Every structure is written in structure tokens, then in C-alpha cells.
Image (tube, rainbow, N blue to C red):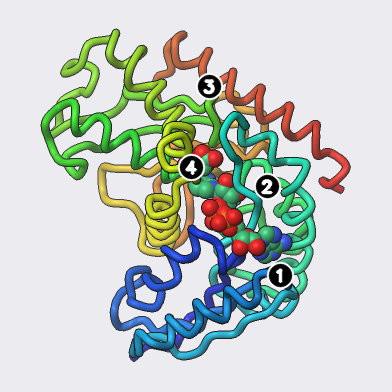
Amino acid sequence: MKTPIDVAVTGAAGQISYQLLFRLAAGNFLGNDQPVILHLLEIPSAMDALKGIIMELNDCASPLLHRIEITDDPMVAFKNVDFAFLIGAKPRGPGMERRDLLADNANIFAHQGKALNAVARRDVKILVTGNPANTNALIAMHNAPDLKPENFSAMSRLDHNRGLAQLAEKCGVLPLDVKNMIIWGNHSTSQYPDLHHTKVKGQDALSLVDQRWFEQQFIPTVQDRGTAIIKARGQSSAGSAAHAALDQMRNWVQGTEAGDWVSMGVRSDGSYGIKKGLVYSFPVTIENGKVSIVQGLTINKFSAERMKASENELKEEREAVKHLLG
Ligand code: NAD
Ligand code: LMR
């Protein structure tokens, strides 16, 4: 057995965490020889519900689950953690955009950024899922000056997976036959799911589908999938969100496949003309835990306009929280 890893999960009594925690305990993150210690953060009013979840986790008698610690103090939750899944935040309801959550959620990430800065391991990997994820990641990053920006990422893997699934269904293949999907920008309706570099069984995706489907079906379906799920189930996505969080964190540790990449919200270094410092979703490759933005992709006018629109939205969000950025 390996040395246990310390994994923090915030919003541990919420609906995404309910899908995530049992999978962490079952070895779905880094394999069934990797024990875990769970550090669960909640607000005081959710502690009773969390205690019920802990009873259930213990009732799984998982050989990998070495310990569970619960707290309402981020300074305790993040102490020496290797991984932090920042999920705890208010979700949107019908008729809202994710950016409408900033007023309620931004302070959470300022506070948690400071705590991570103070007590987490210096090589901690922090995945921000709570919405609006990109700008919350930006806030947490700015409040953790002793950590590197590379310690942080925002979740765009759910959008990436949605793109894989939509294209695979259209082409009558499996999602694993689709490579080089890209989500550019914000985890919002301004995101740009781009098929110009995507391959299906080695063939250019855009040679297999018509431009009308790409523009009028694919792009809006991926952009608006979160809204469609809220409309259908009355609550935002949870199972697919937990799955995407595991996918994104796992790739961050284990790397990307040769010839493929994943989409990840990371601090822009100015690649593709995107304003340096914004947390923006790019195609990335990962090796030995190091994330590199894929360089040299040809961007046509259609793509450039959409990438810019999402960048502009992120600039507006950044402006709205500038008081939290130090
Ligand atoms: P939920 O309401 O079921 O659970 C959120 C939990 O967070 C609650 O138990 C709440 O008590 C807790 N919480 C609130 N403030 C906290 C704090 N300061 N510290 C610790 N815990 C706190 O919501 P959910 O459905 O699990 O969604 C969580 C967040 O994830 C929402 O913001 C949602 O919009 C977002 N989300 C993002 C994606 C994505 O792709 N990035 C996908 C799905 C959902
Ligand atoms: C999603 O994309 O499913 C989540 O961000 C939840 C939401 O608000 O749409």
C-alpha cells in the first residue's frame, strides 16, 4: 500500500460531493492501491447532514479510506493537503447565469485562498468547481501569494466531456474515438467549444459534420447544457460534475495521452492573445504534473471572435471582484 494522500473537499454535504466522496473512497481517483485521508469542510448548518454522509462512508468499509476529518474551519481542512476540491458554493437556479453567483460566492474563495496559502502543501493541486469557477479560481489564486498560480485550476472538464459526448453521438462513435476537443474561455454560456482541431478516429471532425450542425447545434448545446440540466431536474448537474472533477484532477496527476490534450481553466500566460492573468480554459497537455498550454494552433476569424467574447466576459467578472484581488 502507498502512503495515504490527503484530499480536501469543500461543500462536503452538497450534491456534487455526495457523488464524489464515495468514489474517492473507492479508489476511482488514483487507483485501488492509493489510500486516502479525507478532509471535509462544511458550514456549521450543514454539519448534521455531513455526519450522516460520514456514517455512510464508514459503512462502505473501504480498505482505502484511512481517516475522515470534518471541520468548518478552512485552516484545519487544508492543513498539509495534497489535493483540494473546492466545490462548496451556492449553485444557480432557473433563470440565473453563473456570474450572478459572484456576489454570494466570491468571498468564500478569498477566504479559502488565504487558508490554502497558509497551511496547504506547497505542491497542492487545487481544482475550483464552485461557480463561477474561473473567476473564483482567480480570486483564490490572488489570495494565495505564496502558492504558485500553477497550483490552481478551474473546472472546464465537464464542458470538454459534454463536447466529446455530443460529437461522438453525432458521428456514431464512442467518446474515446474523439481526440483534441477544445473548450476555450469561461465556464459560462460564452465558452467556445471548438472543433477545428478535433479528430474522430483520426479524421478531421469538421469534415464529418456540416458547418450548420457545428454552429447551430453543437456549440449552443455544449454552451447551454448546464441550463438544460437545471431545467430538466430542477437542480444543477452533480454526477457528471463529480466525474469531471475526478477526470480533471486525475489527468493533472497522471498526465495526458500522447497525441491528445484536455481543456482546463488555467492562468493565461498571454497565449492566443488572451489577457495575461485571467483564468481561461485552454487546451493543455500535462506531463509529470506540469500543465502546458498547447501552442501553435491556427485560429480563424470565426474562432477568434468567440474566444475574444469569452475573454471579455472574464474581464468583466474580474472587474466586479477587483476588491478581492489584493
Ligand atoms: P449544493 O448546494 O448541493 O452544495 C454546496 C455545499 O457547499 C452545501 O452543502 C453548502 O453548505 C456548502 N458550502 C457553502 N458555503 C461553504 C463554505 N464557505 N465552505 C464550505 N462549504 C460551503 O451545490 P452543488 O450542486 O454541490 O454545487 C456546488 C457548486 O458547484 C455550485 O456553485 C455549482 O454551481 C457548481 N458547479 C460547477 C460545475 C462546473 O462545471 N464548474 C458543475 C456543477 C456545479
Ligand atoms: C454545469 O455546467 O452543469 C454547472 O456549472 C452548473 C450550472 O450552473 O449550470
Amino acid beneath label 1:
Ser
Q: Earlier in the sequence, mark 3 or mark 1?
A: 1
Amino acid beneath label 3:
Met
> Can residue 276 be spotted in the picture?
yes
Separation of marks 2 and 3 at Cα, in angstroms? 20 Å
Q: Are marks 2 and 1 in contact (CB under 8 Å)?
A: no
Mark 3: few/some/many CA within 10 Å (<14, 14-19, 20+)? many
Mark 4: few/some/many CA within 10 Å (<14, 14-19, 20+)? few
Q: Which one is in front in this view, the residue at disc 2 or the one at disc 1?
A: 1
Residue wearing tag 1: 45
Q: Secondary structure at mark 3?
A: helix
**Above or below 188: residue 115:** below
Residue wearing tag 2: 136
In the rendered structure, the answer to whether residue 62 lies left or right of residue 155 reads left
Residue 325: x, y in percent? 82, 46
Q: Which one is in front in this view, the residue at disc 4 or the one at disc 3?
A: 4
Residue wearing tag 3: 307
Amino acid beneath label 2:
Asn
